Amino acid sequence: MNPNRVIFITTLTLWSMGKGHGGPAFTKTVQKYIDEGWEVYLISDEPSNQDFPSLDATHNIFLRPTIFKRFNLLRKIGLFFRWLDHRIMTRRFCRVACAVIDGNCENTILYAYEIFGVEACRRLSQKKKIPFVTRFQGTILEWVPNTFINRFRRFMHFQALSTPANCVIMTDDGSFGARTLRNLGNTSPTLFLRNGLDLMSMDISSMKAAFDRQAFRTSLGVDMEEPMFLTVSRLVNWKRLDRSIDGFADYCKTHSAGKLVIVGSGDQQANLERYATSLGIKSRVIFTGSVPHDNVYQYMMACDIFLSLYDLTNLGNPLFEAMALGKCIITLDLGDTRSVIQNGENAFLLTLETLPTLGSVLSLLVKDSTLRQKLGAGAAAYAQEHFQTWEQRMDTEFQAVSALLEKSSI
């Protein structure tokens, strides 16, 4: 009998900011099936995925990107190139996956990780009678009206999330993914799950006790007595790091001590650095660039206040990790943030209307250590009660996906 087999098809990177940096969700997913003894294939057009040590070249198949991919972001005509790229890559994904399957469909699952692999998996599933899974790390469509023009502009998003599958796995990241699926008429069996946290399987108290906070802050250029504010994210438009910089600039008008540390990398870093310079606070804003995921905990333990002011949703792993570490958090009431955050209990919650008061809120929290400690303790208590380890999260998914093979064999 052939071993169980899963074929991942994607254009996504295994790590959001390079190997070992950024969100680990995709890596954890692939590794889970390997650890369970499945034969795992990864088919992608992302060169960095070739560095994944758990898969040999036979199972980690890299397809060279089309020439059209480099023009995807061009204004006005980028949509045409995205359509061409998607159409060509879908056909290439199908061709390569067919060669992997090689007539042996037994005990095989097709797995589309994010929107760009869905159409290829749908076609292969229909042709080969193989069950398939779609996996989404949240969605932007809650904020995109379902109109003809938007369906045209965002055709891959609408197509992918509308596609029925044997199982849809949607990250519960506050972007209303389950509701979006319903609104699009996708009634497929759905797992709506938060990401796991490595921290939940660690001895956080011992980790914090062993951490040399003073030495770490000194290495950053942050005095032990001055307030340290922290953000952690990819430096891309929708993460809205400019909001943190604006609020910190207001804070700096009345406070001579304090540093804003921005952890992460992305295409907006140069713009954000120029913006900090234009506000006259360049020397007080520290851009670290991308750091290894496990090292992010040190930045969190070193900071006094954690900021998460993204568009769309703020319920991602950086905020959850800050909660688990008992940090005082300021975040924004967008998406489904209130499903986790209780204002004044486990974080300070701003709205778009009250966002201009961020500088004053920073000042308040710096002066009121009792309030900071209360919010941090509330965050840690919530995390201990509600958050899962990655092992628990992946066990839930693995059981559901494994059950698809049992159904297909009946």
Image (spheres, grey):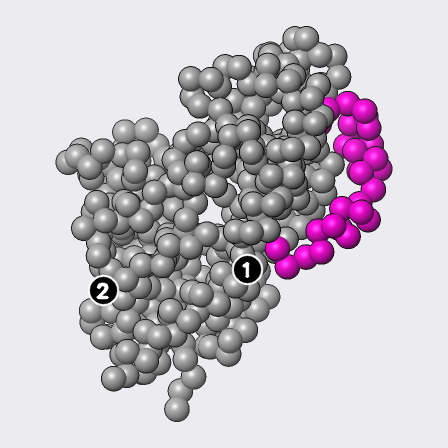
Q: Identify the residue at the far left of this view.
A: 148
Q: Position of residue 295 (x, y in %)?
A: 69, 46
Q: Residue at x 40, y 87 (%)?
A: 2
Picture quarter containing residue 337? top left
Instruction: Tell me the CA gap for discs 1 and 2.
Output: 31 Å
Amino acid type of the residue that numbered disc 1 sits on in the rendered structure = Trp
Closer-to-camera residue (350/314): 350
Q: Is residue 409 above or below residue 119?
A: below
Q: Is residue 305 visible?
A: yes
**Residue that mark 2 sits on:** 123
For label 2, the crowd category at 10 Å Cα-Cα, with few meaning under 14, some 14 to 19 and many 20 or more, is some
Q: Decide which of tag 1 and tag 2 comes sooner along the chain.
A: 2
Closer-to-camera residue (194/16): 194
Residue 364's disc is none
Amino acid type of the residue that numbered disc 2 sits on in the rendered structure = Arg
| Image quarter in which the C terminus is found | bottom left
| Image quarter in which the N terminus is found | bottom left
Q: Which residues are magenta?
A: 200-228
**Residue that mark 1 sits on:** 390
